[in-house]
Amino acid sequence: MPAISLEGVRKSYSLAQVEFRALDDVSLSVEAGTIQGIIGFSGSGKTTLLRCISRLERVDAGRVVVDGADLAHLDGAALRIARRRLGIVFQQYHLLRSRTVAENVALPLELAGIGRTAIAARVGELLEWFGLNGKRDAYLSQLSGGQRQRVAIARALATKPAVLLSDEPTSALDAETTASVLETLQRVRDEMGITIILVTHELNAVRAICDKVAVLDHGRIVEQVSVPDLFLRPSSDAARRLLGLPNSPDYVRMLIGESKLPADSILLSLQLAGASAELPLLTQAARYFGIDLHVVHGEVGRLRDVPYGNLIVVARGEAGPIARAVKFLRENGAAVNPLDSHDGGNRA
Ligand SMILES: Nc1ncnc2c1ncn2[C@@H]1O[C@H](COP(=O)(O)OP(=O)(O)OP(=O)(O)O)[C@@H](O)[C@H]1O
Ligand SMILES: [Mg+2]
């Protein structure tokens, strides 16, 4: 059974009589014990999606089933109880300044009406697990960003939820602190068996800890794939742009700071993965066919031990040899797509 299942979720906002569809027919199934990433450009609907899952926001249509309960159609006491199966962490921590670390972690337990002794035991257990024992009586102003986020995660887990929703939990943190918070989330999944939804705009976070990732674009899920597939075979336009693999030649020219390319050149988008990324394919193609291949944008790296490259390349030479080079690259496992050009430069 999936830990979270969304079916046909719609949510609109009206501003000045104009209806705006923030979520449009969103369906998503998240397996228990996995870390599901959600990425998308600003305004694509990520926070709205989390707010709808947690019932901070009511959906206009569709089903939101969390750990077996349809939150979209619960109210009152039943909703309050069902919501304890969910923990939420935000970018800005949302911790109380007037309370100590231990008192912040205790808050959801107090709201749930748990007795003092049981609260003390649970808080002690969480502070120990999160390495916050030494900080139990500290106030927020005495904590680093990473410690605050760990307190926020501990508080979100106080009522032993099945699911943790986190909205950009690391975007206010530096790279090293980000890595340690991500590691904490991974341990939460591994050791507590909690299902996590991680909304982020940081591809590194997705690469580091997510199992699957959904790409939101204008309120729609345009891709729901395994993490390797996102990096090795992004299929949606939004995913490609998030990965820095734009489809528009004008945008690429802006990136590389050249408004016009030489007349005998074309822009190619090239994706290599696995064996093809281990071969010196570009050098070979250039040498065999007597053309120039110049990498102007992109990234190379390893993903769970598979080497890959996502590149934008300027190919310069005569049309025939360029076409043969493209054929050679494809025969050797590269995905090659000419970027359509408005000035007639596309000849591949
Ligand atoms: N309460 C609201 N009233 C009206 N419009 C809203 C409201 N909340 C969100 N929106 C609109 O819905 C769209 C999606 O917003 P949302 O905050 O979900 O985006 P996001 O993907 O989280 O963006 P970001 O990466 O900037 O956090 C935006 O166009 C936003 O202006
Ligand atoms: Mg947001």
Image (cartoon, grey):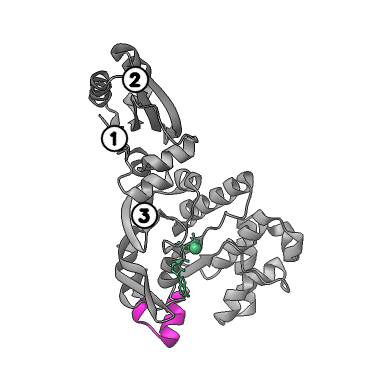
Earlier sequence position, callout 1 versus callout 3: 3
Q: Is residue 76 magenta?
A: yes
Most prominent secondary structure in the magenta stretch? helix
From this view, report whether residue 141 is shown above or below residue 120: above
Which one is in front in this view, the residue at disc 2 or the one at disc 3? Answer: 2
Residue 146 lies, in percent from the top left, at: 65, 54
For mark 2, give the secondary structure.
Answer: helix
Q: Amino acid at mark 2?
A: Leu
Dot in front, 1 or 3: 1
Q: How many marks?
A: 3
SS for dot 1: loop
Task: Compare marks 2 and 1 and give the one earlier in the sequence.
Answer: 2
Residue at image x 32%, y 13%? 290
User: Rounded to the nearest whole Å, what is the CA distance between mark 2 and mark 1?
Assistant: 27 Å
Residue wearing tag 2: 281
Q: Residue at x 58, y 46 (%)?
A: 179
Based on the displayed image, in which of its 4 quarters is residue 291 positioned? Answer: top left
As measured in the structure, the alpha-carbon distance from the residue carrying label 1 to the one carrying label 3 is 35 Å
Which residue is pictured at 31% across the width and 61% down the height? Answer: 29
Residue denoted by label 3: 214
Q: Nearer the viewer, mark 2 or mark 1?
A: 1
Snapshot quadrant of residue 59: bottom left
Read off the magenta span.
72-83
Mark closer to the chain start, 2 or 3: 3
Taking the image as drawn, is residue 114 in sight? no
Could you tell me which quadrant the C terminus lies in? top left
Q: Which residue is mark 1?
A: 344
- Judge whether residue 226 is colored magenta: no
Tell me, yes or no, whether the two marked residues, 2 and 1, touch with CB atoms within 8 Å.
no
